[in-house]
Image: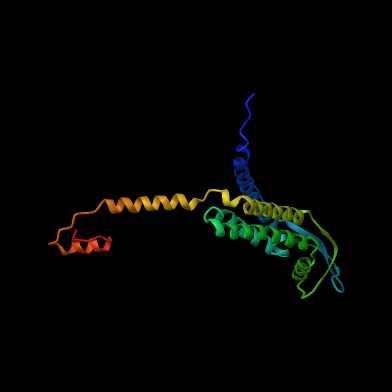
Amino acid sequence: MTREPASSSPTRAPRRALGAALLSGAAGAAIVLIAAGQTWGEGEASQSGFGAGELPVTASGSAVSDLPSALALVGLASLVAVFAVRRTGRMIVASVLALSGAGAIGAALVGASDTRALERAAADALGLTEAAVTSVSHTGWPWLSALGGLLLLIAGLLALSYGRQWPAMSGRYERGERGERGERRGRRTAVDPDRPEDIWKALDRGEDPTT
């Protein structure tokens, strides 16, 4: 039996980390954004006096806090930007990705027990400035949102650890642009010195009309 060279394992590690970061970051952002539109809290808006009764109210994740979804969008943008920058810029973007995941986790955990959104919903339902909410319960969506934030955090940590060894999109585009500029310079149009319009066109192209 033949064994693979020992050097193949370090080479595969950045590739595996790249795939894991892309999958983790994209899945994490999607989970947070989906969770933001789901019901996080439920309760009963109680009214005393004339017409006393209870009215069911709910609060979605976006009503509780816009922060998780906003941080998910920042994380998703950072995940794409990681491949558009190099060196120090890549480390900065990877840090933003990790911090957006950590922030999404914190915001989701705080919102898991929040009742202010339910109180606002109760006040709107009863037409009052303030309203009491009873029988409050919370769903599992805030915890799922926190899981999405954790996946974003993992993607950021992978980018910080292996990002310097990942390829960059900009290099390919820059080489293509340099090649196109070189081809344009190589295809120089003949200039008739007796035609002023040809001279001006050559100057606009950055060419020397005297040559």
Name the foreground residue: 148 vs 114.
Answer: 148
Drawn side of residue 136 relative to residue 22, left or right:
right
Asked which quadrant contains residue 35, the reply is: bottom right
| Quarter occupied by the C terminus | bottom left
| Quarter occupied by the N terminus | top right
Name the foreground residue: 119 vs 138.
Answer: 138
Q: Residue furthest left?
A: 194
Q: Residue furthest front?
A: 6
Drawn side of residue 3 relative to residue 53, left or right:
left
Residue 31 visible to an observer of this rendering: no
Residue 188 visible to an observer of this rendering: yes
For the point 61% across and 33% down, which residue is it?
Answer: 5
Counting labels gives 0
Give percent across and percent down for residue 97: 63, 57
For the point 81% across and 62% down, which residue is it?
Answer: 113
Give percent across and percent down for residue 208: 23, 61
Give percent across and percent down for residue 43: 82, 62
Asked which quadrant contains residue 185, the reply is: bottom left
